[in-house]
Image (cartoon, helix red, strand yellow):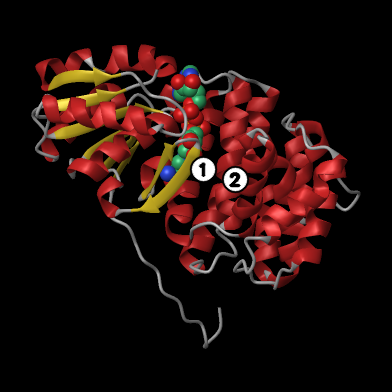
Amino acid sequence: MSTGTRFTYDALPGRILFGEGLAGTVLADELDRLGCRRVLAFAGEGERDIADRLLPPLGERVVGVFDGVRMHVPAEVAEAATARARELEVDGLLCIGGGSTTGTAKIVARETGLPILAVPTTYAGSEVTPVWGLTTAARKETGRDLRVLPRTVVYDPQLTWSLPSALAVASGLNAMAHSVEALWTEAANPVTTSLAIESVRALATGLRAIAADEGDRDARTALTYGAYLAGSCFAVAGSGLHHKICHALGGAFDLPHAETHATVLPHVLAFNAPTLGPVAQRLAEALGCDDAAVGLSHLAREVGAPQRLADVGMRPDDLDEAVDVIAAKLPIHNPRPVDRGDIASILAAALHGTETC
Ligand code: NAD
């Protein structure tokens, strides 16, 4: 830190409770704090068992359960959920699940202004961001609105024990992408950087431990904590070059989301690392290595994530089109100016994997 240090930090409100087994004991009190007497709960199919354990003790306060959750919040799902909330005249929303379930409740909150109590069951981090997403006619739109930010979040790592290890790894690596990108976005600041570094430390520890032993409960706690911090820094710092590349690739070539993040991130980091100064060293240390980009790539290999875009469905022949799609988004804010040639180099390195990563 130097005498010239200046920054703006738009802190977000929100009450966070963290602890194993907490969801089974605090939900009624937390709904009371929010003044919620008639609640619509949200839980997708894969989260139904968890909801079946958590909802009965809340009794008649839960007047309905919306279980029509689908990935990327299709408009018809959002409309059905909003209609249900209005019809039941609820005064609060309780979402129990991953990013898709939270995302559905968020759209209802955007339309109605109702408060959300979120109980996450994956490492997506959406529960601490004011970002909503909605898919209409196969096009996903996103935006920021403080009304969608959950008022209270109950993090209970126990709820992630049932997440299969492949999903846990994918979800944890997504969280990692939020944290690493938060180091260089336009709104990044020393506070979000500290959150991001601590998040990377917790996520790397958790990811390595579940790769070694799927049943490691401390690992699930570390991942839950890391995911909370990752969501928090992403919520303030926003996204940048890495997310723009991954979204463009996902949209143009229908590549799998988490695997695309895992293969591209080390190469965007290698490109940006020279501009990060001492933060690059802090990141490397959090990853337990000497060079952050190499360390990130090795971590992905250790946890069984793919190493190359070529392994997740991108063909060498697609490279030129991919460069065109991303170059169409230039200029992209980045600490190191980025042009079409840089995008081509990053993609070529990610396509085949390189010795440097
Ligand atoms: P998800 O919510 O789609 O869940 C993946 C699958 O896991 C689902 O089938 C779900 O039912 C199941 N599942 C969830 N918890 C489980 C558990 N504990 N045990 C067993 N199965 C479980 O996936 P996700 O990765 O949590 O979220 C991804 C979505 O969230 C994407 O649409 C992404 O765009 C969005 N997202 C939004 C933000 C934001 O700030 N708005 C941030 C991160 C992610």
Asked whether, in this view, residue 354 is left or right of residue 234, the answer is: right
Task: Give amino acid for label 1.
Answer: Gly
Q: Residue at x 44, y 46 (%)?
A: 141
Residue ID for mark 1:
226
Q: In the rendering, at what x and y percent does residue 55 appear?
A: 24, 17
Q: How many marks?
A: 2
Asked whether, in this view, residue 342 is left or right of residue 2, the answer is: right
Label 1 or label 2, whichever lies nearer to me, is 2
Does residue 282 sit above or below 43 in this rendering?
A: below
Q: Residue at x 16, y 27 (%)?
A: 39
- For mark 1, does the 10 Å Cα neighbourhood hold few (<14), some (14 to 19), or many (20 or more) residues? many
- Of residue 212 and residue 305, the one placed in the foreground of this image is 305
Residue ID for mark 2:
176
Q: What element carries label 1?
A: helix
Q: Is residue 245 visible?
A: yes
Q: Residue at x 33, y 18 (%)?
A: 67
Q: In the rendering, at what x and y percent does residue 253 appear?
A: 69, 38
Asked whether, in this view, residue 193 is left or right of residue 154, the answer is: right
Quarter holding residue 340 = bottom right
Q: Does the residue labelled 2 lie within 8 Å of ligand 1?
A: no
Q: What element carries label 2?
A: helix
Q: In the rendering, at what x and y percent does residue 337 appear?
A: 70, 73
Callout 1 touching callout 2 (CB < 8 Å):
yes
Q: In the rendering, at what x and y percent does residue 79 appear?
A: 28, 31
Q: Looking at the image, is mark 1 or mark 2 earlier in the sequence?
A: 2
Does residue 233 sit above or below 205 in this rendering?
A: below
- Of residue 128 and residue 17, the one placed in the foreground of this image is 128
- For mark 2, does the 10 Å Cα neighbourhood hold few (<14), some (14 to 19), or many (20 or more) residues? many
Quarter holding residue 33 = top left
Q: Can residue 161 be seen in this view?
A: no
Task: Give amino acid for label 2.
Answer: Met
Asked whether, in this view, residue 18 is left or right of residue 220, the answer is: left
